Image (cartoon, rainbow, N blue to C red):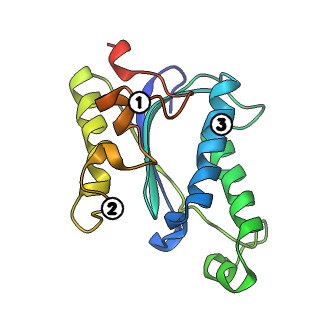
Amino acid sequence: MDLGELYFWTATINGWQKLLEKDSFKDIIIRSLKYLCNKGKIDVFAFVIMPNHIHLIWRINELNGKETPQGSLLKYTAHEFKKMLPQRELEGYAVPASNKQYEFWQRDPLAIHLYTQKVAYQKLDYIHNNPIAGNWRLVNNPRDYKYSTAGFYELDVEGFSFVKDLREEF
């Protein structure tokens, strides 16, 4: 991802396991996003945290030390997930690698450059409608899903202090 550009980004839990069903795991992602925003490394415009994946619309502003902010997000959350999971559940994320025991995120997250307002708003709608889509049906109305920016955009609810308004970018 190029610095300073808007992207739709998806990261998926390894094996599509529903690690993020519990709010405590979602809160880890929120804390990491907030930290990176407060440090000026990223700008977050929209997100949804689903049971086995996350979608973001964000901009990478600068590296986090020698790491990309997206790398820092995945690394930090993985370390925190490991601390929270009992050994029997950790085994579901075990990998035969020399540099790590467990892998919580699938490799190569999807990044789509948002080069026009139309494309950006299509992805914004997609993110916000994810909790009511097909097999999920987590809520009846997207704005009712706690771990999403739908309420911010539909009702001006300031649930996440670090979120910037995508409408101000175009």
Task: Name the amino acid, label 3.
Answer: Thr
Q: Earlier in the sequence, mark 3 or mark 1?
A: 3
Give the labeled residue for mark 2. 138
82 or 7, which is in the foreground?
A: 82
Residue drawn at 54 percent across, 59 percent down: 107
Asked if residue 158 is positioned above or below residue 25 in the image, the reply reads above
The residue that label 3 is drawn on is: 68
Kind of residue at disc 1: Val
Instruction: Kindly indicate whether the residue at mark 2 contacts the one at mark 1 (C-beta within 8 angstroms).
Output: no
- In the rendered image, residue 161, in percent from the top left (x then y), is placed at 56, 27
Q: CA distance from mark 2 to mark 3?
A: 32 Å
Measuring 62% from the left and 59% from the top, which residue is drawn there?
24
Label of residue 157 in the image: 1
Q: Nearer the viewer, residue 77 or 146?
A: 146
Nearer-N-terminus badge (1/2): 2
Element type where label 2 sits in the image:
loop
| Residue 80 at x, y percent in the picture | 73, 58
Count the marks: how many?
A: 3
